[in-house]
Image (cartoon, grey):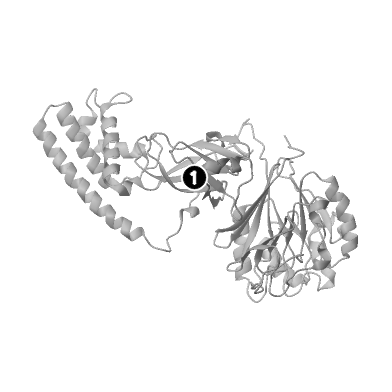
């Protein structure tokens, strides 16, 4: 229950005292103060009630410093942080665990250069309990949720509390004892109430000890599944919003995955589709092979339109894969993807700049055709990369580098110098697994995990392979900001498996 409800429940047990002039009137008042003192004492004596406090920070609660956000731990709360999550809020919310980073190296986060490979949602916590630094910075529709243990000594009326009706009864006895001594000067009554309070407190201790034992199971859901969903009304234009000023959201967000759909079993494709919808992307960049076994119109209806019809045709883009072009060269798919057909006269290699609902674009997507002429596409790509000052993301179905057991070491015909040409990353499918590689200082991600049978890796990984995963299906969630490109791989359980953050000085900050 929230603190206000808890106080009111205690006062129901104190009908006469609650009406006394000078005891329960004014703010603060004597009765409210005794309720607070009792709640603090119970927390100190019964450790169960010290656990699981949550404080949620939005952009207005934090100060942006460089590429990070800086905030203060709850003041006067004897706060011991145990868990932290970086959240995107909305109709659905996405929770990413924040991993601890050394406080002494917190300027790595502020400068956007954390010394870590893998998950890069990070928090550095002041060991003296004063501040914390979160990377990446917390922007509009983002939150940090901090779970902590400790004695909570300050409560707002709307704060959640761990207290139940047994605590209400104990606190009521404590308050009666204090009033009997300080107001009525009746030491006998004071002693009687305090004895009852002590017994009740002992029962609370024994009861909560059993509750703690019951909760210690290895497969309990983690708090990463808990979402605040506290977006204030009228952040988006709509009915009832009147003349509310709308702040521009400085991100473009999309999903990338490949190799989805299989008429023999749609279970995994549908699981990925449900994950994609829960992430609420601006668009889908499919990494190829969206139709198995072939791309005929009937198959397309069953394994592509049914799970992803909400995105087709306007927010679904495809890097054609080998299964997509087996039937009629992909003509049936091309006829369906009418928005894509407007790019580069309907060719299978094209580029576009996606925009968010505020007309902002922070990424430039360049889609290549793995089955077309490599030299001609490289000649087409180079000047376009050189002319773009956005995040330049190159997409193709067949990866230039992969450790996939069937396709290693990759498509050597598309091993170009993407880095010197101005690209920032290459995304591919074809390998039915997830892999992150760094080749000559340039990142490649393979995410052929859209629903068609996962595969293993070669015994010796391809040179540059840094991370490999093939346990569950999933997708990449890509967030582009002026200064940062964040790529996070989620599996269909909703867990963050891997994350990569790229940083740069933005040429065009898009005010």
Q: Position of residue 278 (x, y in %)?
A: 59, 55
Q: Position of residue 315 (x, y in %)?
A: 73, 54
* Left or right, 458 with reference to 30: right
Quarter location, residue 277: bottom right
Note whether 125 is above or below 405 in the view shown.
above
Q: Residue furthest bottom?
A: 264
Quarter location, residue 456: bottom right
Q: Residue at x 25, y 54 (%)?
A: 207
Q: Position of residue 87 (x, y in %)?
A: 55, 47
Q: Position of residue 54 (x, y in %)?
A: 43, 44
* Left or right, 412 with reference to 27: right
* Left or right, 65 with reference to 260: left
Residue 450 seen: no
The residue indicated by pointer 1 is 145
Q: Residue at x 28, y 53 (%)?
A: 208
Q: Residues within 10 Å of mark 1 (few under 14, many from 20)?
A: many
Q: Nearer the viewer, residue 374 or 20?
A: 374
Q: Nearer the viewer, residue 305 or 61?
A: 61
Q: Which part of the image, by quadrant, shows the N terminus?
A: top left
Q: Residue at x 60, y 49 (%)?
A: 115
Describe the element under mark 1 as helix, strand or loop.
Answer: strand
- Report how many numbered discs are placed on residues in the image: 1
* Left or right, 383 with reference to 181: right
Q: Which part of the image, by quadrant, shows the C terminus?
A: top right
Note whether 352 is above or below 448 in the view shown.
above
Note whether 261 is above or below 203 in the view shown.
below
Q: Nearer the viewer, residue 96 or 412?
A: 412
Q: Residue at x 85, y 45 (%)?
A: 387
């Amino acid at each position: 229950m929230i603190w206000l409800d808890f106080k009111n429940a205690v006062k129901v047990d104190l009908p006469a005292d609650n009406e006394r002039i000078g005891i329960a009137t004014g703010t603060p008042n004597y009765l409210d103060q005794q309720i607070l003192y009792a709640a603090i004492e119970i927390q100190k004596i019964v450790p169960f009630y010290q656990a699981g406090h949550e404080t949620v920070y939005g952009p207005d609660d934090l100060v942006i410093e460089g590429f990070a956000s800086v905030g203060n731990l709850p003041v006067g709360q004897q706060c011991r942080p145990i868990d932290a999550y970086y959240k995107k809020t909305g109709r659905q919310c996405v929770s990413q665990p924040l991993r601890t980073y050394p406080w002494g190296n917190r300027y790595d986060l502020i400068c956007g250069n954390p010394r870590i490979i893998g998950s890069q949602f990070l928090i550095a916590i002041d060991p003296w309990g004063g501040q914390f630094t979160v990377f990446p910075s917390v922007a509009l529709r983002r939150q940090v949720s901090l779970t902590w243990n400790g004695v909570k000594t300050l409560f707002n009326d709307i704060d959640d509390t761990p207290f139940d009706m047994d605590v209400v009864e104990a606190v009521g006895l404590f308050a009666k004892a204090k009033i009997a001594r300080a107001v009525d000067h009746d030491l006998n009554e004071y002693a009687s109430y305090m004895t009852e309070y002590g017994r009740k407190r002992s029962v609370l201790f024994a009861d909560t000890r059993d509750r703690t034992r019951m909760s210690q199971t290895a497969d309990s859901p983690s708090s990463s599944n808990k979402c605040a969903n506290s977006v204030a009304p009228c952040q988006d234009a709509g009915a009832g919003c009147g003349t509310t000023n709308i702040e521009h959201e400085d991100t473009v967000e999309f999903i990338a995955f490949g190799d989805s759909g299989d008429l023999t079993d749609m279970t995994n494709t549908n699981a990925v589709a449900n994950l994609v919808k829960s992430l609420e992307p601006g668009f889908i960049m499919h990494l190829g092979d969206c139709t198995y076994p072939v791309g005929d119109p009937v198959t397309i209806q069953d394994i592509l339109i049914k799970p992803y019809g909400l995105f087709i045709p306007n927010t679904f883009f495809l890097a054609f894969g080998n299964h997509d072009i087996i039937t009629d060269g992909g003509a049936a798919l091309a006829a369906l993807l009418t928005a894509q057909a407007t790019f580069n006269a309907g060719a299978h290699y094209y580029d576009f700049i996606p925009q968010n609902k505020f007309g902002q674009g922070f990424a430039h997507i360049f889609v290549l055709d793995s089955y077309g002429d490599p030299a001609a596409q490289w000649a087409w790509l180079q000047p376009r990369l050189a002319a773009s000052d956005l995040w330049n993301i190159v997409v193709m179905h067949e990866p230039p580098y992969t450790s996939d057991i069937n396709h290693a070491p990759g498509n050597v015909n598309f091993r170009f110098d993407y880095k010197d040409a101005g690209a920032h990353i290459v995304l591919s499918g074809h390998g039915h697994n997830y892999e992150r590689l760094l080749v000559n200082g340039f990142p490649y991600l393979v995410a052929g995990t859209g629903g068609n049978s996962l595969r293993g890796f070669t015994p010796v990984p391809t040179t540059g392979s840094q991370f490999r995963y093939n346990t569950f299906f999933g997708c990449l969630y890509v967030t582009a900001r002026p200064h940062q490109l964040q790529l996070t791989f989620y599996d269909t359980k909703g867990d963050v498996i891997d994350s990569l953050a790229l940083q740069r000085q933005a040429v065009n900050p898009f005010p």
